[in-house]
Image: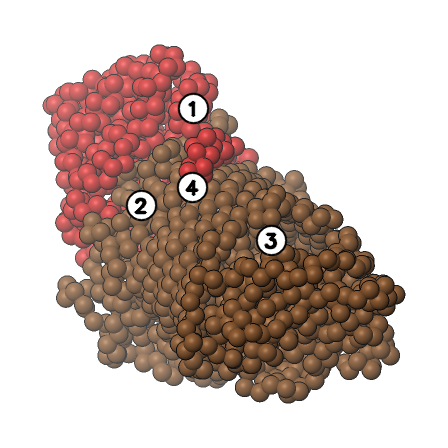
Chain colours: A red, B brown
């Protein structure tokens, strides 16, 4: 036995194994600038691709973050499944939709935290550290923005240590936003002011993406002056951002894009696949008659005819309206990126911030920039309330089927019940504005409490 | 007259006389000198049963029984060799006659002493002895005329020994006339024969008591049935050969107490789940350690060996392929199953789930023997599921629409509106009702002499399928094994290699589910003659256009070198290399897919997976006599490296033509392109000490320290060990006096083994490359939430066993009680709140799992003679129980496990009957909802564990005719299937018991209650069964005929597998349950010849 022990102590090397060919240790990965950057690509890839690894089984930020709120609100419906839990606002805590949104947002947050910790400890160049940490903070802020808008109070996780993370309870929305704002401000300072890190493509976050998202977060937090300031920064950068024709908005080279996801592994934006008609010519997720009716339309008077209808909506042989903002839904024909942040929203953020600060003419000017591109006459609204409604309407049309704007707008302005109750009827409850916390989370972390109504 | 023999090298034997000048007896040394023997203990009768005993030891034994002293000088007995003696209460004089028969000694009894002297030869005798030498040839057979190959022939009083060849023949040259030879063969009574003629035929009688002498393989060492301190069961080739199966594990079903074996499917090559003494772990692997000729052999399906995420999902036909089905049963000599701590602790960290040792055949000695074996047979599905008649089904559908207040339309009810109501296809007949054919051929050539031997064998097997659309499973292989011993007998080499090739062309689907769900009037083709599709199920003709070709090969090379350094010290090294690989091409052409929801796209999966294992195991063995006991010690080490690779795994679609699908290079689009590998290293040191006092009291202690690459820094090593004790109480005089038992042993063991069946690298904090790039740039994502702190799961095993033999061991009963407890559970997917980034991670849980049970194994020979009847019966009763789960974790596992219940519990709703056709359930927590999960209304309704299981065998033989029956039985509960009345899809006949209100709407109250019914106790049913697992009838041709056809041994046989099953279970099969293709009924006829 003694002999055995002695022999073994010298044999430590005999049971050491190399990591598999497709893996690297975390220590090694942040010691090399190429692999360190690959962790950031991996973060975007896992957010957007269907099979990134980890727990990703569907494209969270390719389809779920768009389709779930669109159906919860009044943008689209699912005719093949009349009992759709989203359309009926009857989500249950075990729903796969909420599980995907929750789990994969936190997976991305974990990746961001890991990049921040890895790069902070890394000996790589300061330039690289700034950019990568900046992107990670931007993504973390974006994920928290998404989470609070779906779920309300959520656990605030900013480190990777599993033992301390597993029992953290929900933080108030304001605290989560405070973290997001602080991350975005830091990101503004860390990130490059151009798209050089993504070879000119607008598929990785830069200083302007952080600024644009910060403007949005301030607006949601009713910090109108700050929102106006941030939005103005973006709008003022006319060398980089401008409003192209409606048919050009979502193209890869669009000057309007502030931040978009690169194409998925099949070479097209997921949302196109989800919204365009399938082989039988019918879309599975058409636009609601409610949304179609919201477009200002009068073919006889061009000033009253919203060009966005012709540019972004089509009708199937079966009479279903569907979104054609994206038209690339098969490999090899891709011309588009999935745009998350774009200039038009910044005008609308500033319009709303100005209206709330009683700068009514300034608000009207910003609205009219958007309306003009859509071939519409200037807004007739002149009072603050009328302008705010006009902005809500303009957001409904301009940003339809894009990353949950309609659902989040109705909730943050407190108008969800007023608008949705007549449409949804008895299915609508006040408590439906928050999605349920996934059941497994409450089972696995007893410090979490369910949202009311579930 | 006396003779003294001396061995010369090699098989040739010569003897010469040696003149001895010891003319006087020097009587000095008495073994009993110290002891005073009282007159009262003096007896003239002795009982002895000794093999290979030294004369001095034998005299010692006689002295203790009789009080007689033996007087002799040491030089007298010098070189006298060893003797065998058996006497049952016989007179001392008779016994001594036997002992000294053929030995150059004479004795005389004076008072209470036996005085022994050497016999001096006369001069004449010395001169003529060489002239009288005989060149002896002979043949050894059993009473029944069976040839005994490998029987040993020893010349009494010497260490010279030869063995019989395949025909039972032997020859010895230059044997002096009057010499005595001893013929012995395991399982038979030794015979002594005085050589007077040059040609003799010897028959041996079966010796029941010698069952105790059967060698038991315990891996790094071997022992005998009698001296075994642990719990193990050994199955021999004879038992394996009788079953016409391709996977050796299946042959063990019903034969080994404590070993629960379940076929997962009736598909050829499909996996078998094996559980030895219950489920020890919450979620580490439960697979026993398989060791083939000293080489660990992974029981994990080949495609799953690379690690998680490497499983070929959807591409693996007929379930996972069992690597053990690549081992040819005909090449196996013995399979030994080790169960308790004493037996398994020497395998340390890998012994927790039990160990299965497989030893392949070695060549015998003697003239070359050529053996061929061919069989062919048919198989089919045993039974069909009862279904509602087509009229009843359609009537039910109409009633459902009436209940729903809806009118059947072409879209809602094609079966009522579009399809021909009189069409009545029996889809079970069509899809799983074919008759499969099988051919199996084995050939082997074996030759050898005293020092070397060689075995060559080849096999081929071909099975077709019972499924619609056919498919074939083919397997072929070669095996070579060579042994060499040096002339001085000190160096031994054993080398073997085997290659097995398999090709599985079975369909990608097993049709079991389709066969019972497609309505009888479903048309396969539409009016235009094209395949007809609806959304509810696939058109089976479409499915037959898919294919999955799985090619595997298994190469095993192993060898051992041993060298006897000193008389009692030897060194041995096992070396081995294993390579298994599997290539898959699975194709789903567009024409095989439903065009209803999306435009079908041809897709294929192409993968290659392989695994290699290297192992080196040096060991030192030492034996010494201490007092009246024998001490043996072994010190050894092991180093193992296993590498698994998946050079490519490609999932591709969009081909220019369906005929181009054989290569993925013709695909336009790739959804997954992956390459993986993983490595595992293992090092270990072990020690064994065994002390045997007079074969009566035994202690066996084992220690092992293992290091594994699967654990993090500081957690890599673990210590394991056991102590086993045995008492052969039937050797005690007071038991002998009772005259009841022929054998009695009480044994017990306690020890700790481990389980390291966790994924490689689990402790490592790593990034993995994403399968898809981000805009053409490579990406990495975190592989897992790393936990460097998890470590060994340990399994503490306790066992007490009682082994009894009656009527000269014609009846043997082995019974055991065991209690195994595992704690420090390694849970690979311990649930984590997703806010940590992942939903699970690997960690140790402070949970305690207990498996406790009793096992009985009875063997008896009620009738013996020309007609012999052998019986055996075994039963295992075990209980699995989760003893504790930390409170903090009980919420995590509340849905799956409950403290106090089995890990395999059914947690179900309690069905309270029906109200207006809607199933009602008990709201156990009273919250007004029926829900699982947090608002749990489930209870422990039962367990998947069998209540008891076992087997029963009966063998009748009369001369060359032999009939073997093997039944296995299991008492268990299972889950019945039940369709919902009114839905589109064929209905099972148990619908008659259903009280659901028929409806065709998934929103109807009755249908919604049906969804919960599936998770309720309403479907629990008795799934117990008794199955006639195997019948084998064989006839060995009489010797006369054999001589005519020039065979040494020829037999014809008929075999049947799964011929009938007695069960109350209504589904296809109580063993596989559900709608999986059940184990098949099989008839096989064949012939076996040796030349």
Q: Does label 4 or label 1 sit earlier along the sequence?
A: 4
Q: How far apart are marks 4 and 2 (CA)?
A: 28 Å
From the top left corner, tell me how far across and down residue B573 is, in percent: 59, 44
Image spot of residue B317 (x, y percent): 57, 57
Image mark 4: chain: A
* Label 3, label 4: how far apart the Cα atoms are: 26 Å
- Comparing marks 4 and 2, which lies closer to the viewer? 4
Say which residue label 2 marks. B844
The residue that appears at 22% across and 27% down in the rendered structure is: A180
Alpha-carbon distance for marks 2 and 3? 34 Å
| Tag of residue A1 | 4
- Secondary structure under the numbered disc 4 in the rendered image: loop
Residue B651 in view of the camera: no
Which residue lies at the image location 62% right of the left edge and 46% below the top edge? B564
Q: Which residue lies furthest to the front in this view?
A: B24
The Cα atoms of the two marked residues, 4 and 1, are separated by 38 Å
Q: Mark 1 points at which residue?
A: A28
Q: How crowded is mark 4: few (under 14 residues within 10 Å), some or many (20 or more)?
A: some
Pick the residue in front: B817 or B11: B11
Residue displayed at 62% across by 67% down = B116
**Picture quadrant of residue B160:** bottom right
């Amino acid at each position: 036995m003694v002999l055995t022990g002695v022999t073994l102590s010298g044999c430590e090397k005999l049971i050491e194994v190399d990591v598999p060919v497709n893996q690297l240790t975390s220590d090694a990965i942040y010691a090399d600038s190429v692999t360190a950057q690959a962790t950031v690509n991996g973060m975007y890839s896992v957010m957007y691709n269907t099979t990134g690894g980890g727990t990703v089984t569907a494209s969270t930020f390719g389809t779920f973050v768009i389709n779930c709120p669109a159906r919860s609100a009044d943008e689209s419906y699912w005719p093949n499944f009349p009992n759709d839990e989203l359309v009926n606002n009857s989500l249950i805590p075990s729903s796969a939709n909420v599980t995907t949104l929750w789990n994969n947002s936190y997976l991305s947050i974990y990746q961001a935290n890991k990049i921040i910790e890895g790069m902070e400890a890394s000996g790589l160049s300061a330039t690289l550290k700034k950019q990568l940490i900046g992107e990670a903070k931007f993504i973390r802020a974006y994920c928290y923005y998404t989470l609070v808008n779906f779920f309300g109070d959520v656990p605030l996780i900013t480190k990777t240590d599993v033992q301390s993370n597993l029992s953290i309870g929900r933080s108030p929305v304001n605290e989560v936003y405070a973290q997001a704002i602080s991350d975005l401000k830091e990101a503004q300072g860390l990130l490059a002011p151009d798209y050089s890190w993504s070879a000119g493509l607008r598929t990785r976050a830069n200083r302007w993406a952080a600024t644009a998202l910060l403007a949005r977060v301030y607006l949601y937090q009713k910090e109108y002056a700050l929102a106006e300031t941030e939005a103005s920064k973006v709008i003022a950068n006319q060398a980089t951002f401008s409003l192209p024709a409606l048919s050009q908005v979502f193209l890869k080279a669009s000057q309007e894009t502030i931040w978009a996801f690169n194409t998925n592994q099949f070479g097209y934006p997921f949302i196109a696949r989800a919204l365009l008609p399938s082989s039988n010519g019918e879309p599975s997720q058409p636009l609601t008659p409610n949304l179609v009716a919201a477009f200002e339309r009068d073919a006889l008077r061009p000033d009253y005819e919203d060009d966005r209808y012709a540019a972004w909506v089509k009708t199937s042989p079966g009479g279903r309206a569907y979104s054609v903002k994206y038209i690339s839904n098969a490999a090899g024909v891709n011309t588009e990126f999935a745009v998350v942040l774009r200039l038009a929203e910044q005008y609308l953020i500033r319009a709303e911030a100005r209206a709330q600060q009683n700068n009514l003419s300034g608000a009207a000017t910003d609205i009219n920039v958007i309306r003009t591109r859509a071939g519409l006459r200037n807004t007739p609204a002149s009072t603050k309330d009328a302008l705010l409604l006009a902005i809500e309407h303009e957001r409904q049309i301009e940003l339809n089927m894009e990353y949950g704007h309609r659902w989040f707008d109705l909730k943050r302005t407190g108008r969800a019940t007023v608008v949705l109750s007549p449409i949804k009827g008895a299915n609508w409850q006040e408590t439906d504005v928050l999605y349920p916390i996934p059941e497994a989370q409450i089972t696995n972390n007893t410090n979490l409490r369910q949202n009311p109504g579930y | 007259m006396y003779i003294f023999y001396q061995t010369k090298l090699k098989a040739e034997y010569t003897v010469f006389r040696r003149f001895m000048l010891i003319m006087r007896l020097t009587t000095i040394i008495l073994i009993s000198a110290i002891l005073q023997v009282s007159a009262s203990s003096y007896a003239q009768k002795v009982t002895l049963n000794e093999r290979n005993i030294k004369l001095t030891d034998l005299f010692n034994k006689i002295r203790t029984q009789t009080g007689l002293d033996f007087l002799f000088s040491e030089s007298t007995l010098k070189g006298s060799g060893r003797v065998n003696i058996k006497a049952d209460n016989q007179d001392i004089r008779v016994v001594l006659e036997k002992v000294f028969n053929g030995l150059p000694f004479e004795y005389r009894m004076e008072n209470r002493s036996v005085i022994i002297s050497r016999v001096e030869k006369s001069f004449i005798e010395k001169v003529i002895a060489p002239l009288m030498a005989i060149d002896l040839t002979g043949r050894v057979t059993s009473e029944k005329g069976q040839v005994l190959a490998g029987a040993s022939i020893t010349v009494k009083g010497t260490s010279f020994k030869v063995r019989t060849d395949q025909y039972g023949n032997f020859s010895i040259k230059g044997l002096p006339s009057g010499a005595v030879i001893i013929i012995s063969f395991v399982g038979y009574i030794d015979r002594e024969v005085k050589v007077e003629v040059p040609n003799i035929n010897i028959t041996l009688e079966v010796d029941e008591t010698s069952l105790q002498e059967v060698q038991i393989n315990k891996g790094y060492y071997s022992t005998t049935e009698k001296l075994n301190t642990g719990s193990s069961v050994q199955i021999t080739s004879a038992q394996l050969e009788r079953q016409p199966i391709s996977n050796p594990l299946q042959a063990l079903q019903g034969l080994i107490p404590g070993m629960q074996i379940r076929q997962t499917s009736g598909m050829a090559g499909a996996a078998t789940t094996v559980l030895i003494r219950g489920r020890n772990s919450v979620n580490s692997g439960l697979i026993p350690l398989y060791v083939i000729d000293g080489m660990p052999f992974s029981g994990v399906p080949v495609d799953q060996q690379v690690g998680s995420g490497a499983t070929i999902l959807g591409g693996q036909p007929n379930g996972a392929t069992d690597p053990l089905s690549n081992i040819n049963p005909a090449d196996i000599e013995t399979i030994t199953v080790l169960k308790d701590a004493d037996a398994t602790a020497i395998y340390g960290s890998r012994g927790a789930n039990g160990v299965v040792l497989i030893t392949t055949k070695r060549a015998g000695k003697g003239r070359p023997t050529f053996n061929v074996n061919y069989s062919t047979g048919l198989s089919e599905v045993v039974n069909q599921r009862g279904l509602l008649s087509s009229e009843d089904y359609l009537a039910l559908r109409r009633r459902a629409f009436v209940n729903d207040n809806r009118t059947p339309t072409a879209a809602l009810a094609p079966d009522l509106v579009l399809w021909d109501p009189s069409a009545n296809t029996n889809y079970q007949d069509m899809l799983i009702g074919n008759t499969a054919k099988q051919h199996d051929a084995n050939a082997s050539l074996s030759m050898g002499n005293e020092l070397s031997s060689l075995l060559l064998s080849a096999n081929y097997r071909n099975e077709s399928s019972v499924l619609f659309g056919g498919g074939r499973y083919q397997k072929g292989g070669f095996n070579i094994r060579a042994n060499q011993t040096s002339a001085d007998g000190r160096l031994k080499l054993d080398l073997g290699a085997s290659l097995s090739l398999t090709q599985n062309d079975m369909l990608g689907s097993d049709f079991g589910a389709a066969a019972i769900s497609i309505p009888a009037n479903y048309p396969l083709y539409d009016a235009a003659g094209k395949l007809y599709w609806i959304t509810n199920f696939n058109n089976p003709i479409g499915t037959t256009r898919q294919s999955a070709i799985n090619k595997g090969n298994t190469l095993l090379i192993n060898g051992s070198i041993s060298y006897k350094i000193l008389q009692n010290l030897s060194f041995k090294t096992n070396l081995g290399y294993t390579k298994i690989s599997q290539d898959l091409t699975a194709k789903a052409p567009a024409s095989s897919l439903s065009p209803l929801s999306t435009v079908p796209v041809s897709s294929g999966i192409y993968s290659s997976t392989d695994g290699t294992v290297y192992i080196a195991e040096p060991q030192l063995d030492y034996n010494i006599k201490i007092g009246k006991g024998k001490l043996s010690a072994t010190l050894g080490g092991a180093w193992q490296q296993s590498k698994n690779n998946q050079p490519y795994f490609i999932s591709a679609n969009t081909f220019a033509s369906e005929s181009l699908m054989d290569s993925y290079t013709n695909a336009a689009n790739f959804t997954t392109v992956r390459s993986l590998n993983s490595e595992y290293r293992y090092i270990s040191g072990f020690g064994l000490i065994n002390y045997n006092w007079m074969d009566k009291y035994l202690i066996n202690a084992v220690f092992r320290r293992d290091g594994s690459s699967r654990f993090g820094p500081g957690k890599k090593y673990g210590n394991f060990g056991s102590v086993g004790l045995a008492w052969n109480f039937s050797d005690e005089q007071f038991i002998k006096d009772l005259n009841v038992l022929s054998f009695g042993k009480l044994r017990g063991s306690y020890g700790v083994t481990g389980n390291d069946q966790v994924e490689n690298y689990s402790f490592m904090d790593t990034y993995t490359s994403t399968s898809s790039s981000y805009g053409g740039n490579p990406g990495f994502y975190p592989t897992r939430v790393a936990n460097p702190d998890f470590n060994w799961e340990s399994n503490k095993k306790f066992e007490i066993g009682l082994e009894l033999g009656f009527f000269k061991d014609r009846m043997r009963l082995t019974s055991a009680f065991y209690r195994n407890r595992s704690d420090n559970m390694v849970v690979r997917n311990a649930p984590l709140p997703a806010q940590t980034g992942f939903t699970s991670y690997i960690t140790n849980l402070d949970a305690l799992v207990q498996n406790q049970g009793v096992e009985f194994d009875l063997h008896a020979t009620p009738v013996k003679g020309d007609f012999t009847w052998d019986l055996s019966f075994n039963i295992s009763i075990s209980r699995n129980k989760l003893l504790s789960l930390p409170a903090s974790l009980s919420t995590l596992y509340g849905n799956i496990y409950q403290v106090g219940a089995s890990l395999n519990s059914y947690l179900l709703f309690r069905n309270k009957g029906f109200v207006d056709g809607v199933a009602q359930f008990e709201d156990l927590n009273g919250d007004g909802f029926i829900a699982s999960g947090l608002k749990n209304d489930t209870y422990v309704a039962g367990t998947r564990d069998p209540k008891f299981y076992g087997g029963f065998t009966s063998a009748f033989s009369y001369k060359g005719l032999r009939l073997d029956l093997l039944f296995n039985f299991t008492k268990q509960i299972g889950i019945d299937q039940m369709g919902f009345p009114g839905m589109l899809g064929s209905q099972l006949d148990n619908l008659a018991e259903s009280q659901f209100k028929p409806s065709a709407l998934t929103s109807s109250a009755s249908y919604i209650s049906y969804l919960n019914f599936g998770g309720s106790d309403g479907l629990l049913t008795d799934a117990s069964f008794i199955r006639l697992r195997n019948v084998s009838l064989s006839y060995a041709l009489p010797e006369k005929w054999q001589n005519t056809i020039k065979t040494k041994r020829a037999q014809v046989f008929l075999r049947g597998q799964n011929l009938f099953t007695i069960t109350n279970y209504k589904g296809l099969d109580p063993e596989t349950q559900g709608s999986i293709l059940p184990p098949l009924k099989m008839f096989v006829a064949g012939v076996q010849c040796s030349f």
